[in-house]
Image (spheres, rainbow, N blue to C red):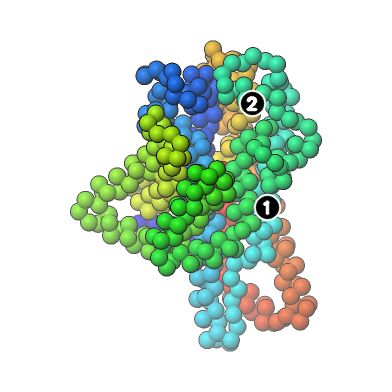
Amino acid sequence: MPRLPSSGRLVALDALRGVAAGIVLVHHVSMTAPGIAAAYQSTVGVNTGSAGWWSTLTPLKFLVAGPEFVLVFFVLSGFVLVRSPLASRAASRAASRAASRANGLAARGYDWVAYYPRRIIRLAIPVVVSVALAAAWILLVPRAGIDVGGSWLARQDSPDIGLPNLLGEASVIGGSGRPDVNPPLWSLTWEMWFSLLLPICVLLAVATRRLPALWAAAFLAVSATGYVTGIEPLMYLPAFGLGALLAANYESLRTWAAGVAARRGGTALWIGLTALGPALLVSHWLLRPQLSGLWGDLTLALRVPGAVLVVAVVALWPPLQRPLSARPLVWLGRVSFSLYLVHFPVVVAFGTMFGPGRWWLGALVSVPLSLALAQLMYLWVELPSQRLANWTGRWASAKAGALRRSGGGGGQADVAASAAAPARAPEDERAKA
């Protein structure tokens, strides 16, 4: 079984991010089809065998489950972001023991001073550029006053491209309500809050090593409460917590997974778990004609354990990792953040341009164009922002170290401790929501 590097990096999980971003793209493209958009809103009048029926009331919903796969992003972020501090914590303890035996010096742990500027810049620059690009698309293909048909496209009419609204959307946590210039940015709000609260989440992750099943049940109960009450922090933040729980208990889960796979019927169990994750993700849609009210809300909450299972099976079962390591999927994972940020205004622009009767022509243009723009965004915006973020993190860390030493710190001891400290994990803390 391939080991997960200390940085929390696993190629199959990167590819899963790409698959999730691709499904979000397909979901938005499908919503430009009036029949599918109407079936998404209500099952009333949906004819068996129609496109709306196939895409909302059958297991094929999994292929266009955009909102559900945003939760997969959240679980992945919780897993990856928590993994690096936990690995540094373990390495720091080992180095401290070795250093104390040698000369009484302690090694440093995770560099939180570097983390915050690195993480904020890493998210902020692509988000700002995406808002500017979305505004440019809106100016290029005006939406107001055009009868495009279809309930979903109608809701994208007349976005506010005034400067205050653009600044609010670009700030991610400074806006009010759902974004209307680049709506997928709603998920970046929760990504940013989790990023800011990461030290607390790491402490919680360490705590979950005792009674992890009880912690998992608690997170799921909080999430279910959020779906029943409509309180968004309770809906979404537990998904990050469950990803953190998976990271904290990864080694013990790997041992358990290997034992299960080695037993008779182990492969059948893993196949069942692989199918169960997607089934839970879309269970609300399959049960929607029969359930409503409280029970309908509770079926919505099942998407959270479904997202956790999807990530856990990919992280723990090698036979599923191999197909996800194919080059196209690895590339899709590499550009997934950029794809998530740039695709929506492209889909709406061409859906508007071609109209409801020829929505499929809009799809034929917007899908490849979104992929091409994602590659350019990755090369020209995302990679430079990563380099700037890493440089800024190193600069902030060096400045903080200099201040500690000038303030009567350890001087020579700090230098020795720095030499004993574990290498920082490479930057792979991507927010793919």
Q: Is residue 144 above or below residue 71?
A: above
Q: Is residue 130 above or below residue 195?
A: above
Q: Which residue is mark 2?
A: 156
CA distance for labels 1 and 2: 29 Å
Q: Please name whichever residue, 379 or 141, is drawn nearer the observer in this view of the structure.
A: 141
Q: Position of residue 180 (x, y in %)?
A: 67, 32
Question: Are there few (<14), some (14-19), or many (20+) residues within 10 Å of tag 1?
Answer: some
* Quadrant location, the N terminus: bottom left
Q: Position of residue 427 (x, y in %)?
A: 59, 55
Query: Tag 2: residue type?
Result: Gln
276 displayed left or right of 346: left
Q: Position of residue 336 (x, y in %)?
A: 55, 40
Circle 1: element type: helix
* Quadrant location, the C terminus: top right
The part of the image, by quadrant, that contains residue 401 is bottom right
Q: Are marks 1 and 2 in contact (CB under 8 Å)?
A: no
Q: Is residue 313 above or below residue 185?
A: below
Circle 2: element type: loop
Query: Tag 1: residue type?
Result: Ile
Say which residue appears at 39% left-offset and 24% top-offset.
Answer: 54
Residue 110 in view here: yes
Say which residue appears at 39% left-offset and 37% top-offset.
Answer: 283
Say which residue appears at 61% left-offset and 55% top-offset.
Answer: 195
Residue 375 in view here: no
405 displayed left or right of 350: right
273 displayed left or right of 191: left
Outermost residue to the left: 264
Q: Which residue is mark 1?
A: 120
Q: Position of residue 272 (x, y in %)?
A: 29, 45
Outermost residue to the top: 357
Say which residue appears at 70% left-offset and 82% top-offset.
Answer: 410
